[in-house]
């Protein structure tokens, strides 16, 4: 049986455009590795899934304009539908 802390290598195939997006995000956030970027992305997705499971909406608030913009992400709608 494998130790849960043991690392497993995963390989992804992505378009050049998506890789460029990842690299731009890494530059903007000063991340050094794609592993860091994916760990942060997974943390955010895990939180969003939990919130939708609990019936909450994921949104951003533009305080000066007093506007709310809901995140439209099909994966989260699947979670919300199953939670009902």
Image: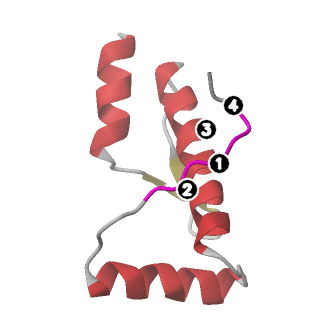
Q: Which residue is mark 2?
A: 60
Label annotation for residue 4:
4
Q: Report if the CB atoms under discs 1 and 2 are less than 8 Å apart.
A: no
Residue drawn 61% across the image and 82% down it: 26
17 versus 71 height, above or below? below
Neighbour class for label 1 at 10 Å: few (<14), some, many (≥20)?
few
Neighbour class for label 3 at 10 Å: few (<14), some, many (≥20)?
few
Q: Report if the CB atoms under discs 2 and 3 are less than 8 Å apart.
A: no
Q: In front here: 26 or 51?
A: 26
Residue 65 drawn at (x, y percent): 56, 68
Q: CA distance from mark 1 to mark 2?
A: 34 Å
Q: In front here: 74 or 34?
A: 34
* Mark 2 secondary-structure assignment: strand
Q: CA distance from mark 2 to mark 4?
A: 35 Å
Q: CA distance from mark 4 to mark 3?
A: 21 Å
38 versus 17 height, above or below? above
Q: Which residue is mark 3?
A: 47
- Name the N-terminal-most of marks 2 and 4: 4
Q: Which residues are magenta?
A: 3-10
């Amino acid at each position: 049986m494998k130790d849960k802390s043991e690392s497993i290598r995963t390989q992804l195939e992505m378009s050049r455009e998506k890789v460029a997006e990842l690299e731009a995000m890494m530059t903007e956030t000063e991340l050094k590795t794609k592993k860091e970027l994916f760990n942060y992305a997974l943390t955010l997705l895990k939180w969003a899934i939990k919130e939708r499971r609990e019936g909450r909406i994921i949104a951003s608030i533009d305080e000066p304009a007093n506007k709310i913009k809901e995140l439209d992400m099909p994966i989260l709608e699947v979670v919300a539908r199953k939670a009902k």
